Structures are given as structure tokens and as C-alpha cells.
Image (cartoon, rainbow, N blue to C red):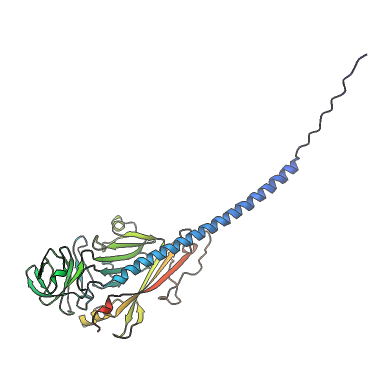
Amino acid sequence: MKTFAPPLHHATVRGFTLVEVMVAMVIGMIGMIIMLQVFSAAEGQRRSTTGTGDAQGNGAMALYTLQRDVRQAGFGFNALNALGCPLTLPAPASRTLAQLAPVVINPPTTDVPAGDANSDTLLIAFGSGNGSPEGDVVTAVLGLQLGLQTAGSFATGDRVIAGPSAPTVGCALTLATVTAVTPPVITVPSSGAVDGGTLFNLGQNPRILAYAIRAGNLTVCNYMAANCGAACTATDGTCSANWVPIVNNVAALRAQYGHASTATSGVDTWDQATPQQPSPPNQDTLACSWARTSAVRIAIVARNSHVDRDQITQQAPTWAGSGATAINLSARANWQNYRYRTFETVIPIRNLPWMATC
């Protein structure tokens, strides 16, 4: 008798159908899209926050730098007989500046080449000497030797400026160097000093600083170390060597003088009118105009470093010096795709009030 093995029963194995697989893929893709959108929004917010923080830091640093130098402006030559006179600088500058003044806004382009469009330039001068900032009376001129009332306040290597005894039409100043001190006389080659005139001691480390916005950076050039008046553009190698970037992503620098109409009125006018020699020439009037220019109002427009896909800035910023008129930023490509912060302040020129009123 034959014995037959029972038939084999194969277990039924069920998997995912094509429809189920496709549904799972769609759900996964939707989840991934949602996660990517959330990540993109979070990343955009992070970059926006970081960029705004960068603009905040850059603007504050730029404003602090300018405040620090403007507050020192005029130290060492705060006297009427020095203000408004042309100043000849030695090498490496080897140039004559149009006027000696604490702060000059938009000086001639031969003194400070123009920076970025719709932005101002500044020329700030101050000394570091130990003598009287009103100068020392020259009691005698003996060739290269000058007799002074307080020769002991000078030291070898000090930079000095010899001025007339009173504001004089046609005055011309020269920045010279003290080569020897043997009180009561000092030795100063090529000083141009006259008997009865005034010798101003700017110390061994004076500053004649030119500021400009170049290629979106706040840059500075020190006339004591370079010829800042040399023609330059943003791509000129000589310009980039002389002009040192100190703060980046600065879109604009705007400035105005604060003028006083009388000796006792205080600042009552704000404008960009640099005091000039009247007609007919009158050095007293020119020097007095500078003495009454006792403050500077400055605005810095900083932008974040991140360019947005959309035009997120519909209206350019304004400042106190422009009233309701917006600061023109249109010279910059895609300027509306950046976020901006405006910083402004009023800086008194603290060394001018020490001079005689006029």
C-alpha cells in the first residue's frame, strides 16, 4: 500500500501594493517639503538677524571712530591766527592743503578725493603736543633758531606750525619739525616763523585724517603717513594702499557743520557751507567763521551683509540733516535688497570754545 505525502501548503506572503508604496512616498515627500520650508524660514530668519546685528555693530563702530577724532579736532592750533590758512605738509604728503581747520566737510578733491556717490568726505586735524594749544609767542628769530617764552615745553621731533601774530590775509603755514631744544631757543628748519608771531606745538604724533566711503567701506588715510590727496578710485592700487578700510558695509556718510550766527548765540544753523575767504579778502572774518563752527552733525548708514531675494527696503533712510528727504542709495546695485540701520549724532568741537570770541 502506497503512502502519499500530504500536499505542501505554501504560506501566503502579503507585501505592500503599488498604491500603498506610492501613498507612503507622497506622505514622506510632503513631510520633507514641510521640513525644508521650516528650515529655509529658520535659516532666513537667522541670516536676517545676524546681518542686522552686523549692521548694528558696523554702524556703531564707524560712529564711535568719527566721534573720537572730531572731539579732538583743533587741539594744538585753536587760535584765530591759524584758522583758514593754507598748510604745506612735508613728505610723504608733499602737498598744500587749502585750509587748516579742525574739521572740513567735503574739502577740495585735491585734498580728499571723492568717495562713493552721494556720500561725504571729512578732513580732521589735531595735535598731541604738551604746550599751550593757543601757541607760544616767538620772541626772536635767529636763522633756524627761534626764541620762545616757554621753549621747555618743546622736544626734539615735535611737529610745529608757525603762524602770524594775528589773522593775516595771504597767510601760509608750514608743518616743520623741531631738531634741537636749548632753552630759551629751539631749532626749527624752514619754519617760516616771524618775530612776534605764534608757534603751535602739535607734538610728535599729530593727526591729519581723511575719511571717505570707498567701495562700501569706511576708509581712513593719514596725511602724516601718505599722500591722501593722490587721485584714486576703488580699484586703484595706490588708493587702496593709502586708504585703510576700518569698517565694512557702510552705505553712506553724511555730515553738516553747526554754525553760530553770533558769539553768544550757540549753534543755530546746520549746513555744509565750508567757511571761505570773503570778497574783498578779510582773514579776521574767515577765522571768525571757523571759530563759530563749533559742532558737526554726522549720520552713518550701515547695511547688513546678506542680500535678500526680495526688495525688502522700499524707502531709503532719512536723517536729521535731510529732513524728509531720503538719503540717496540708488548708486548701489540692488540697494533695495538690503536692510539698513542709520546712526547719527551731534559732536561738539570741544577745542574751539577756548579761543577768543569774535
Q: Is residue 306 left or right of residue 203?
A: right
Question: Residue 57, position in %: x, y?
Answer: 43, 62
Residue at far top of view: 1
Question: Residue 122, position in %: x, y?
Answer: 31, 69
Q: Quadrant of residue 89?
A: bottom left
Q: Residue at x 93, y 13 (%)?
A: 1
User: Can residue 105 be seen at all in this image of the molecule?
Assistant: no
Q: Residue at x 48, y 60 (%)?
A: 51
Q: Residue at x 28, y 71 (%)?
A: 73
Residue at far left of view: 142
User: Can residue 296 be seen at all in this image of the molecule?
Assistant: yes
Question: Residue 211, position in %: x, y?
Answer: 32, 65
Q: Is residue 308 left or right of residue 129?
A: right
Question: Residue 324, position in %: x, y?
Answer: 46, 76
Q: Is residue 340 left or right of residue 177?
A: right
Q: Quadrant of residue 321?
A: bottom left
Quadrant, the C terminus: bottom left
The front one of 125 and 129 is 129
The front one of 282 and 57 is 57
Residue at far right of view: 1
291 is higher (above) or lower (below) than 55 = below
